[in-house]
Amino acid sequence: MNKLREIGGGKWISSAEIEKINRTESSDEFVLIASDEIHLSTCRSGLRLIAEESTSKKILIPSYTCSTVIEPFVENGWQVIPYSIQGNLMIDWKDLKIKVDTIQPSAVLFHSYFGFDTVNDNPKYINKLKEQGICIINDLTCIMLSSFDRLKSDYQIGSIRKWLPVPDGAVFRGPLTTGRLEEDTELVMAKMKAFMSKSDYLAKGEGDKAAFLKSFSVAEKILDSRRKPYRMSSLSKAIFNHKDLKQIADRRRSNYAVLYKRIVKYKALYLPFGLPGERVVPYYLPVMVENRRELQAYLAGKNIYATVLWTMPEKFRYTLSDKDAQLYNTILCFPIDQNYDKADMDYMGDVIDRYFKN
């Protein structure tokens, strides 16, 4: 393993690949979920469009979620109430039903986790919600490349940039029109600077780590500052169309399987999912572990950056039960994406072996 090789810690793309893409003639259009999808700069801007549209403002959202899912609704005066997600990352349907009956929400948001289908096990109840006039929002971000049947919903939305080294990109589908949108040139330039700085650092040993980390931080601040919607950039579309999605899916499944088989023996690690089937494209390999901070630090010392998805949203900090909060306190996500190969997964397995032997 190259001493500058790192596993995890953010995406990258080389200037040479960008030059190759620019020399290749290709359409800047694509279809990921349906022919009537709209391509936005970010997923959160799509959620903001939904939040701004409705006049009845009560929504049920999974207790385990990202703060960027909640924020567009809070900013637009919605009452946001969590419904329980179980330790195996499946919906607690009993809790959801109780809250639907007592709160009478105008919308319910669903999302699956880590590439696996965790929402389609109760279609009759979903249909019942729709019959009651409740708006169904399906966040596809964690299953963007999986091919199993989607939950039937009024809105579908998902982030592309979480899967690929694109500076922006999300798909949006629903009964809304956006009008003509601009590209977010400032965000795209900031993101590309960070991607290429990391690529140069890893591939050529040029620059220093602090510099590209600062570039990523600058780009995230720009992203966090955005309130109006932008369209997905032409550059992101070109990068997307240049990628072989089947090859990416195969590599992710293969990496997941290699690492899964290495670590499933450890009782200290709870793995909520088994091996992925051919219609599942995993996002990360998640585990739940009590001494998460210690394991995460040990891995980081070996250039393995396992991430925490997600930090508990401030909105939920004082409202979740201890059971619901447990996911935020224990989950750790191992990177298995297409940038890595079997040797990287075996290296990660070796490091985890050494951790548990100490």
Image (cartoon, rainbow, N blue to C red):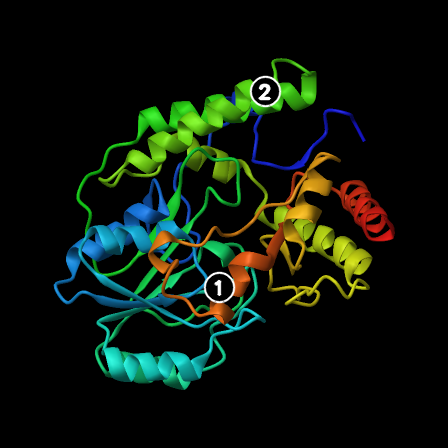
Q: Residue placed farthest to the left in the image?
A: 55
Give coordinates of residue 260: x percent, y percent: 75, 58
Asked whether residue 36 is in view, the answer is: no
SS type, badge 2: helix
- As drawn, the label of residue 7 is none
Give coordinates of residue 120: x percent, y percent: 47, 75
Tell which of 54 and 104 is nearer to you.
Answer: 104
Which residue is depicted at the point 33% across and 48% down?
44
Q: How many marks?
A: 2
Asked whether residue 274 is in view, the answer is: yes
What residue sits right under mark 2 in the picture? 16
> Dot 1, crowdedness within 10 Å: few (<14), some or many (≥20)?
some
Which residue is depicted at the point 16% across and 57% down?
53
User: Which quarter of the figure has residue 141?
Assistant: bottom left
Mark 1 or 2: the one toward you: 1
Which residue is depicted at the point 82% across and 64% down?
265
SS type, badge 1: helix
Residue 284 placement, left or right of 61: right
Q: Is residue 164 above or below residue 280?
A: above
> Dot 2, crowdedness within 10 Å: few (<14), some or many (≥20)?
few
Asked whether disc 1 touches disc 2, contact meaning CB atoms under 8 Å apart, the reply is: no
Tell which of 294 and 221 is nearer to you.
Answer: 294
User: Given the image, on which type of amino acid does mark 1 rest?
Assistant: Ala
What residue sits right under mark 1 in the picture? 325
Give coordinates of residue 321: x percent, y percent: 44, 70
Tell which of 166 and 78 is nearer to you.
Answer: 78
User: In which quadrant of the rendered image does the N terminus lie?
Assistant: top right
Disc 1/disc 2 C-alpha distance (Å): 44 Å
Give coordinates of residue 291: x percent, y percent: 67, 54
Task: Decide which of tag 1 and tag 2 comes sooner along the chain.
Answer: 2
User: Which quarter of the figure has residue 2?
Assistant: top right
User: Given the image, on which type of amino acid does mark 2 rest?
Assistant: Ala
